[in-house]
C-alpha cells in the first residue's frame, strides 16, 4: 500500500505504557484531545443506542399486552399512585434542568456552580428513589407483586382479571425496576464526577466533555421515565369500561 | 509495490529497529490479565474461544456417536437433549459470535486503519472478562446438571416446564452478550474516529467494513435478546407472566423477540468471515479486489435487511399467513447481497496471479461451502418448502454449511494468513495445506448426507429413530465424516503451537500482502506503529501483470 | 438395512406440488453452486502463479457485470418466491368441505378426536381422497405435528388453535413426528398416519373398539355445557343474562367498544376462557373466566357443540346434528386405540407429573375466587 509515514504528532510513547495519560489527559491510543473527545461522544451515543434497544424490547412487550388487555390493565393501574409518580416526574425534570445547567457551568469552568448543581441532581435522584421506595413497599404490603402470593383479593384490583393484573404489575416492576437501577448507577457516576470536580482533577476541570457525557446519560434516564410515567400511571379509560360504567355497573 | 518483504517502519528514518514487541512487553501473568493492548486481548480471546470450541466439539462428538445407532448408544434421552443444547449454546454464544471479531477483528482492526489501539482499551478488556464470566456461568450450569432447552430457549418449555439450569445458563449468555455489545461499541467508535490521516471510508480494507457492519448488528440486536432472555428468567423465578399462555402470555412473542436478535446474529457470524475472505482472495490473487464499493455496501445492506427477516424462522409457528409471505420475500432479497459478494470474489480471481497457499485453499473451500449453505437457505426461504423442511436435518445441514463451512473455514484461513503477523513465526505450510483439504472433505462427508435425510423427513433434536431405521445409513456417513472433521480441526492446534517454538521467523510481510498491518514489524510493537501512518492510496493496489513478468524474468534468470 | 431411499413417500395432494418446487430450487441451487465452483477452480488453475495466461488489462469495476449479477438473482429469486407463495397460500386455505379432526398435543403423546367421537392416540386414521382439516392445540408446551409423507407440518401451540389441511392420496402407513422440541421424550412423541380408502375408514370408525357406545364430540360438548352450567345463562334466544349461542359460529359479533369479530374458533375459545377481554354489546362482564377450569378436551368439545348449532332451549338435543346421525355403534376408544410400539409412551406420559397440574389448579383457584367476588 502506498502509504508514507512521517513523524506525525507521535507523543513519543514506546513499548511499555498502559494507562498513563499523555499531556492534557489524553490516553495513549488517541492522537490528540480532540480525537479523544470525539470518540467519547460517539461512544456515549452508541451506548445510548444499545440502551434504547434494551428498553425498546420491554416497551414493545408492554405495548402488545396493553393492547390485548387494556381493560384489566386499566383496572390494575388504578392502584398506582399518579400523584407520587407525578411528583417524581417533576422531580426528574428539575434534575435534568440542573444537569443541563451543570454542563453549561462546566463549559464555563465554574467549579463551584458545577458542584452545587450536581449536588442538586443528586438530591433529586435521592428523592426519586425514596418515593419509589414508598411506592414499592406499598405494593409489597398489598401483595401486588407477581408470584404465587399475588393478592388473593380481586376486589382490591377493582375486579380486574388476576392474571392480567399480575402481568401489569410484573412489567411495572421489571421496567421501573430496571429504570431504578439506571438511576442508582447514575448517582454513582455523578458522585464520582463530583468527587473529581471537588479534587480539581484536570480531566474534568480543563475539559467539559466528561461532564457532558454524564449529562447525556442522565437525560436518557429521565427520558425513559418520561415514557414510563404516562404508560403506567396515566392510562386512559378504555371505551368498553366507560360503557360498562354508564350501564350502571362498575364498582 | 513489490512482493518482497518491506522493512519495518522503524527502519525508515534510520532509528535503531525496535526489538520490543507486544508479546515481549511484559512477561508476568498480570501483564496479560490486566493488559489493555488490543493485540494481547485478541490472544486472550483466542485462547478462550479455542477452549469453548473444543468443548462444543466434544459435545458434537457425543451427538454423532449417539446417533450411529437408531436406539442410541450410551445416553438417556434427557442427557442427549442436554448434550445438543450444550453444543448449540456453546457453539453459538460462546464461540461463533465472538470468533472472528474478538480475535482477528480485535487484533487487526486498529492496525488496518492505522490506530494505536481501539478507542476504549479498558472496555475491551472488560469485554473479555464478561465473556469468560458468561462462559463460566454456562459451564456451571452444565456441571450442575445441564440445560435441556436447545439453544433457542423456546417458551413455555424453557420458562415453566424445564427443570434444568435454564436461569444460570441464560445469565451466562446475558453476560457474554454484553461482551459482544462492548466489542461492537468499540469497533464503531474506532472506525468512526480513529482512522489515520488519509484513511478515508473508501480506502478502508474490506475486513474493516465487514466488522463495522457486524458491530452495528451487535449493538442493535444483542440488547433485545438480552432483555428477552432476562424475561424468561423473571418468568421462571418470579412467575412474572410474559410468555406462558396459562398466565395470559403469548408463547410466540418470545420467538419473535428471540429471532429479532438471532437472525441478525447469523450475520454477526458470517459478515466478519466475508471480511476475511475479501482480504484472502485479493491478497492471494495478487490483484485489486473487484467491485470494492459493491462488496462494502453489500455488508451494510446485509446488516440492515438482516433485521427484517426474523419471521422466516417462524413459518409454521402460527404467525399470520401474510407475515410469512412478507418475511419470505425479504429473505429472498437478502440473499442478493451475499450473491454480490460471491460473484465479486470470483471476478477478483480472474486474471489474477494466484498463489495456492493454505489460506487461499481455505478461502476457495469457503466459496464452495458457503454457496451450498446459502442456496439451500433458499429452500428454507420459500414458505411452502420450508413447511416440510423446517426443524429437520435439512436445516441442521444448512446452518452447519454456513457456520462451519462458512465462518470456521474463513476463520481458519484468516488465522493462517495473519498467524505470522500475530506471532512472528511461520507454520509448516504443506501440513497446513493438506489439513485444509482434510477439513473440506470431512466437512462434506459429515453434513451433506444430512440434506438428504432432512428432505426425507428426519427431525432434528431426535435422540431415537428406531421407528425410522431408513435414516441410519445417513447418520453413519455423518458420524464417519465428523471424525475426519474433528481431526481436521485438532491438527492445526498442534502445528500452530509448534510453530511458536520452532517456526521460522516471519519478517514483517511474509506474504507480500498489502495493508497497513503488514507495514509494521511482526509481531507488532505495543503501539502498532512507530509514527502515525499517513495514507495516500487505496489498500489493494496490486500489480498482477508486473508481478508475473518479474517472476518470469526471475525464472528465466535462474535458467540461464 | 443398507438400502438407500433418498426421497420421502409422496402421499398427499401437496406432495407433487411441493416436490416440483423443491427440485426446481434444487436445480437452481446446483446450477449456481456449479457455476461458482467451476469458475473458482478454473481461475485458480488457469491464473495460478507462474502459468502463462493473459493477465493484461485486468478489470476492477464493471457496472454492467455488477448489475447483471444483482438483477438476475433478484429476478430468479422473485420468481421462486412467487411460485412458493402460491403453493403456500393453497396449503393455508382448507376447502370448505374438509372433514375436521381435532388434535391435542401433550408431553409426550398425540390425542386425536374424530368428529363422531372416536378417539385415538399417537395414530391418525384418515380416508383417502377426502380433504382433512386438523384443528390442533397443545395442553402444555409447543409441539409440531409433522407428516413428512404429506409434506405438511404446523406447530401445536398452547392457548390457541392452529390448523392445517391435506388430502391423502395414497393408501399406506406413514411416519408421524412431533417436530418441535418439547422435552425429554420429544423424539418418541410420534406414531403413524394410516391412510385408508373411504369405505375402510367408515368401517374403521364404526368398528372402532368394543367399548360401550359413546358420544360424538358435539354431544360430549352438550353434556359439558349442561354440567358446567353454561345453560344457566345461555338460552335458546338472547336473554337478560347472556346472549344466545345458537348458530353463533361464523357470525359477526359486536363488542361494547364497537369492535367487531367473526365468531371463529379462536374467538369462541377466548370468549369461554377469558370472557372479560371482549364484552358483547348489550351485556356486562358477568360471565366468569373458565380458564384453568376446563381441560383442552372439554373446550374442544364445547366448541364442537357450539359449532354444531347449539340450542339448549330447544328440546331436541344436539345429537340430531348431521354428524351424529350414524352414531349407533360408535364407542369410546381411548384405551383400545393405542397402537404398536408407541403405547408405553402414552402410559409414561400419564405417569409423568408435570408442573402443569399444580399451576393450573392455582390459576383455577384464582378464577374461582374471582367468581366468588362477583
Ligand atoms: C452463519 C450463519 C447463517 C447464514 C449466513 C445464513 C444464511 C441464510 N439463511 Fe440460515 N440459518 C442459520 C444460520 C445462517 N443462515 C441457522 C443457525 C439457522 C437455524 C436456527 C435454528 O433453528 O436452530 C438458520 C435457519 C434458516 C431458516 C429457517 C428455517 C426454519 O427454521 O424453518 C431460513 C429460512 O428462510 C434460512 C434462510 C437463510 C438464507 C436465505 C440465507 C442467506 O443469507 C444465504 C445467502 C447466500 C446465498 C444465496 C449464496 C450465494 C448466492 C449465489 C451463489 C447466487 C444465487 C442466488 C440466488 C439465485 C438468489 N436460514
Ligand atoms: C459454530 C457453530 C457450530 C459448530 C462449529 C458445530 C459443529 C458441529 N456440529 Fe453442530 N450445531 C450447532 C452449531 C455448531 N455445530 C447448533 C447451533 C446446533 C443446534 C442445537 C440445537 O438444536 O439447539 C447444532 C446441532 C448439531 C446437530 C443436531 C443435533 C440434533 O438436532 O439432535 C448435529 C448432529 O449431527 C451437530 C453436529 C456437529 C458436528 C459433527 C460438528 C463438527 O463440525 C464439530 C467438529 C469439532 C470437533 C470434533 C472438535 C475439534 C477438536 C479440537 C478443536 C481440539 C480440542 C481443543 C481443546 C480441548 C482446547 N450439530
Ligand atoms: Cu412434542 Cu416434540
Ligand atoms: Cu434467519
Image (spheres, coloured by chain):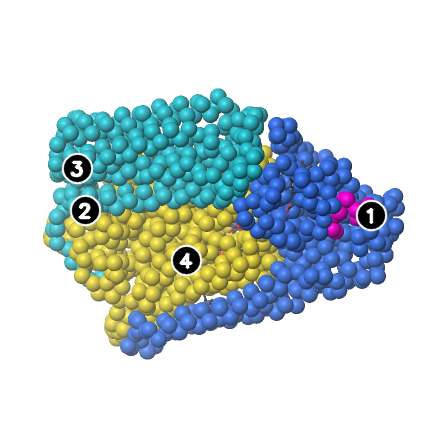
Q: Secondary structure at mark 3?
A: helix
Question: Left or right: B18 with respect to B219?
Answer: left
Disc number placed over residue A35 in the picture, else none: 2
Image: magenta residue range: C305-319
Quadrant for residue C351, please give it: top right
Give the SS element for disc 4: helix
Q: Main secondary structure of the magenta part?
A: loop
Residue tagged by mark 1? C316
Residue beneath disc 4: B305
The residue beneath circle 3 is A104
Tag 2 secondary structure: helix
Which badge, 3 or 2, comes first in the chain's sequence? 2
Chain identifier for the blue-coloured part of the image: C
Answer yes or no: disc 4 within 8 Å of ligand 1: no
Tell me the chain of label 1. Answer: C
Q: Per the image, is C79 magenta? A: no
Question: Does label 1 lie on the same chain as label 3?
Answer: no
Q: Are marks 4 and 1 on the same chain?
A: no
Q: What quarter of the picture does the C terminus of chain B occupy?
A: bottom left
* Location of residue C273 in the rendering, given as x and y in whole percent from the top left corner: 64, 40
Question: Which numbered disc, 2 or 1, marks the residue closer to the eye?
Answer: 1
Q: Colour of chain A?
A: cyan
- Visible residue check, residue B274: no
For disc 2, the neighbor class at 10 Å (few under 14, some 14 to 19, many from 20) is: some
Q: What residue do we see at 38% from left, 51% from top? A: B217
Mark 4 — on which chain does it sit?
B
> Which one is in front, C57 or A227?
A227
Foreground mark, 3 or 2, reads 3
The colour assigned to chain B within the rendered structure:
yellow
Mark-to-mark CA distance, 2 and 4: 32 Å
Amino acid at each position: 500500500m502506498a502509504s508514507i509515514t512521517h513523524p506525525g504528532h507521535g507523543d513519543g510513547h514506546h513499548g511499555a505504557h498502559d494507562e498513563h495519560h499523555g499531556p492534557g489527559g489524553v490516553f495513549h491510543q488517541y492522537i490528540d484531545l480532540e480525537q479523544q473527545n470525539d470518540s467519547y461522544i460517539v461512544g456515549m451515543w452508541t451506548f445510548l443506542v444499545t440502551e434504547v434497544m434494551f428498553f425498546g424490547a420491554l416497551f414493545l412487550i408492554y405495548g402488545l399486552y396493553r393492547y390485548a388487555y387494556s381493560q384489566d390493565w386499566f383496572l390494575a393501574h388504578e392502584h398506582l399512585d399518579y400523584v407520587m409518580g407525578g411528583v417524581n416526574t417533576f422531580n426528574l425534570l428539575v434534575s435534568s434542568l440542573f444537569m443541563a445547567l451543570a454542563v453549561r457551568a462546566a463549559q464555563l469552568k465554574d467549579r463551584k456552580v458545577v458542584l452545587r448543581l450536581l449536588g442538586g441532581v443528586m438530591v433529586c435522584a435521592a428523592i426519586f428513589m425514596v418515593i419509589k421506595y414508598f411506592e414499592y413497599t406499598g405494593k409489597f404490603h398489598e401483595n401486588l407483586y407477581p408470584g404465587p402470593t399475588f393478592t388473593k383479593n380481586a376486589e382490591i384490583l377493582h375486579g380486574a382479571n388476576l392474571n392480567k393484573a399480575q402481568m401489569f404489575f410484573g412489567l411495572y416492576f421489571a421496567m421501573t425496576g430496571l429504570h431504578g437501577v439506571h438511576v442508582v448507577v447514575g448517582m454513582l457516576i455523578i458522585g464520582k464526577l463530583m468527587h473529581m470536580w471537588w479534587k480539581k482533577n484536570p480531566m474534568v476541570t480543563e475539559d467539559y466533555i466528561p461532564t457532558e457525557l454524564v449529562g447525556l446519560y442522565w437525560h436518557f434516564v429521565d427520558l425513559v421515565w418520561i415514557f414510563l410515567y404516562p404508560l403506567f400511571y396515566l392510562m386512559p379509560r378504555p371505551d368498553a369500561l366507560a360503557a360498562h360504567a354508564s350501564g350502571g355497573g362498575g364498582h | 509495490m513489490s512482493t518482497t518483504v518491506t522493512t519495518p517502519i522503524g527502519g525508515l528514518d534510520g532509528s535503531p529497529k525496535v526489538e520490543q514487541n507486544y508479546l515481549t512487553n511484559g512477561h508476568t501473568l498480570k501483564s496479560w490479565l490486566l493488559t489493555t493492548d488490543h493485540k494481547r486481548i485478541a490472544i486472550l480471546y483466542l485462547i478462550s474461544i479455542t477452549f469453548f470450541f473444543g468443548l462444543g466439539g466434544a459435545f458434537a462428538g457425543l451427538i454423532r456417536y449417539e446417533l450411529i445407532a437408531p436406539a442410541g448408544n450410551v445416553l438417556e434421552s434427557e442427557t442427549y437433549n442436554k448434550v445438543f443444547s450444550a453444543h448449540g449454546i456453546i457453539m453459538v454464544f460462546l464461540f461463533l459470535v465472538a470468533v472472528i471479531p474478538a480475535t482477528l477483528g480485535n487484533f487487526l482492526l486498529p492496525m488496518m486503519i492505522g490506530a494505536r489501539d481501539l478507542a476504549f482499551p479498558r472496555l475491551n478488556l472488560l469485554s473479555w472478562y464478561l465473556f469468560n464470566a458468561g462462559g463460566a456461568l454456562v459451564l456451571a450450569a452444565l456441571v450442575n446438571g445441564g440445560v435441556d432447552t436447545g439453544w433457542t430457549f423456546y417458551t413455555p418449555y424453557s420458562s415453566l416446564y424445564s427443570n434444568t439450569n435454564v436461569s444460570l445458563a441464560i445469565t451466562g449468555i446475558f453476560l457474554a452478550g454484553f461482551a459482544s455489545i462492548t466489542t461492537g461499541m468499540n469497533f464503531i467508535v474506532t472506525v468512526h474516529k480513529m482512522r489515520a490521516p488519509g484513511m478515508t471510508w473508501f480506502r478502508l480494507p474490506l475486513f474493516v467494513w465487514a466488522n463495522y457492519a457486524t458491530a452495528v448488528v451487535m449493538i442493535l440486536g444483542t440488547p433485545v435478546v438480552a432483555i428477552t432472555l432476562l424475561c424468561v428468567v423473571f418468568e421462571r423465578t418470579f412467575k412474572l407472566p410474559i410468555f406462558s399462555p396459562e398466565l395470559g402470555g403469548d408463547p410466540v412473542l418470545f420467538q419473535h423477540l428471540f429471532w429479532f436478535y438471532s437472525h441478525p446474529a447469523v450475520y454477526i457470524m458470517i459478515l466478519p468471515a466475508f471480511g476475511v475472505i475479501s482480504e484472502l482472495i485479493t491478497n492471494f490473487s495478487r490483484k485489486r479486489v473487484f467491485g470494492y464499493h459493491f462488496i462494502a455496501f453489500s455488508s451494510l445492506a446485509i446488516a440492515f435487511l438482516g433485521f427484517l427477516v426474523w419471521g422466516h424462522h417462524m413459518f409454521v409457528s402460527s404467525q399470520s399467513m401474510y407475515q410469512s409471505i412478507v418475511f419470505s420475500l425479504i429473505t429472498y432479497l437478502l440473499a442478493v447481497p451475499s450473491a454480490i459478494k460471491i460473484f465479486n470474489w470470483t471476478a477478483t480471481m480472474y486474471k489474477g496471479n494466484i498463489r495456492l497457499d493454505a489460506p487461499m485453499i481455505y478461502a476457495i473451500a469457503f466459496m464452495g461451502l458457503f454457496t451450498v449453505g446459502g442456496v439451500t437457505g433458499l429452500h428454507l426461504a420459500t414458505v411452502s418448502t420450508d413447511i416440510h423442511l423446517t426443524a429437520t436435518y435439512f436445516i441442521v445441514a444448512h446452518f452447519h454449511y454456513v457456520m462451519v463451512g462458512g465462518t470456521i473455514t474463513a476463520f481458519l484461513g484468516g488465522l493462517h494468513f495473519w498467524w505470522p503477523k500475530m506471532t512472528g513465526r511461520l507454520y509448516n505450510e504443506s501440513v497446513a495445506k493438506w489439513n485444509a483439504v482434510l477439513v473440506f472433505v470431512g466437512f462434506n462427508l459429515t453434513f451433506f448426507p444430512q440434506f438428504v435425510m432432512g428432505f426425507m423427513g428426519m427431525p432434528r433434536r431426535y435422540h431415537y429413530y428406531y421407528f425410522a431405521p431408513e435414516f441410519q445409513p445417513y447418520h453413519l456417513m455423518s458420524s464417519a465424516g465428523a471424525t475426519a472433521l474433528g481431526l481436521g480441526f485438532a491438527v492445526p492446534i498442534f502445528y500452530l503451537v509448534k510453530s511458536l517454538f520452532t517456526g521460522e521467523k516471519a519478517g514483517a510481510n511474509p506474504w507480500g500482502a498489502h495493508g497497513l498491518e503488514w507495514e509494521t514489524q511482526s509481531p507488532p510493537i505495543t503501539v502498532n506503529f512507530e509514527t502515525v501512518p499517513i495514507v495516500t492510496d487505496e489498500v489493494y493496489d496490486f500489480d498482477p501483470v508486473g508481478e508475473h513478468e518479474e517472476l518470469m524474468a526471475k525464472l528465466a534468470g535462474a535458467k540461464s | 438395512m443398507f438400502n438407500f431411499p433418498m426421497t420421502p413417500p409422496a402421499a398427499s395432494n401437496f406432495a407433487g406440488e411441493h416436490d416440483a418446487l423443491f427440485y426446481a430450487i434444487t436445480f437452481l441451487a446446483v446450477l449456481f453452486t456449479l457455476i461458482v465452483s467451476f469458475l473458482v477452480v478454473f481461475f485458480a488453475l488457469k491464473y495460478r502463479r507462474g502459468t502463462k495466461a493473459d493477465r493484461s488489462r485486468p478489470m476492477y469495476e464493471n457496472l454492467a457485470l455488477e448489475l447483471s449479477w444483482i438483477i438476475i438473482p433478484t429476478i430468479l429469486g422473485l420468481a421462486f418466491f412467487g411460485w412458493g407463495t402460491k403453493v403456500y397460500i393453497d396449503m393455508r386455505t382448507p376447502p370448505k368441505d374438509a372433514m375436521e379432526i381435532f388434535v391435542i398435543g401433550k408431553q409426550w403423546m398425540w390425542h386425536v378426536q374424530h368428529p363422531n367421537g372416536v378417539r385415538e392416540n399417537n395414530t391418525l386414521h384418515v380416508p383417502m381422497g377426502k380433504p382433512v382439516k386438523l384443528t390442533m392445540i397443545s395442553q402444555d408446551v409447543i409441539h409440531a405435528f409433522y407428516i413428512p409423507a404429506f409434506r405438511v407440518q404446523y406447530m401445536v401451540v398452547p392457548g390457541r388453535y392452529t390448523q392445517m389441511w391435506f388430502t391423502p392420496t395414497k393408501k399406506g402407513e406413514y411416519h408421524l413426528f412431533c417436530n418441535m422440541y418439547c422435552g425429554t421424550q420429544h423424539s418418541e412423541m410420534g406414531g403413524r398416519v394410516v391412510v385408508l380408502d373411504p369405505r375402510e375408514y367408515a368401517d374403521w370408525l364404526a368398528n372402532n373398539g368394543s367399548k360401550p357406545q359413546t358420544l360424538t364430540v358435539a354431544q360430549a360438548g352438550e353434556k359439558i355445557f349442561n354440567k358446567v352450567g353454561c345453560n344457566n345463562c345461555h338460552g335458546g334466544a338472547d336473554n337478560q343474562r347472556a346472549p344466545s349461542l345458537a348458530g353463533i359460529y361464523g357470525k359477526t359479533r359486536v363488542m361494547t367498544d364497537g369492535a367487531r369479530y367473526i365468531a371463529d374458533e379462536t374467538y369462541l375459545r377466548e370468549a369461554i376462557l377469558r370472557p372479560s377481554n371482549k364484552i358483547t354489546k348489550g351485556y356486562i362482564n358477568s360471565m366468569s373466566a373458565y380458564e384453568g377450569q376446563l381441560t383442552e378436551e372439554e373446550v374442544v368439545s364445547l366448541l364442537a357443540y357450539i359449532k354444531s348449532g347449539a340450542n339448549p332451549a330447544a328440546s331436541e338435543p344436539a345429537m340430531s346434528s348431521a354428524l351424529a346421525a350414524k352414531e349407533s355403534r360408535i364407542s369410546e376408544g381411548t384405551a383400545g386405540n393405542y397402537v404398536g410400539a408407541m403405547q408405553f409412551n402414552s402410559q409414561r406420559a400419564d405417569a409423568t407429573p408435570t408442573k402443569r397440574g399444580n399451576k393450573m389448579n392455582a390459576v383455577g383457584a384464582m378464577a374461582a375466587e374471582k367468581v366468588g367476588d362477583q
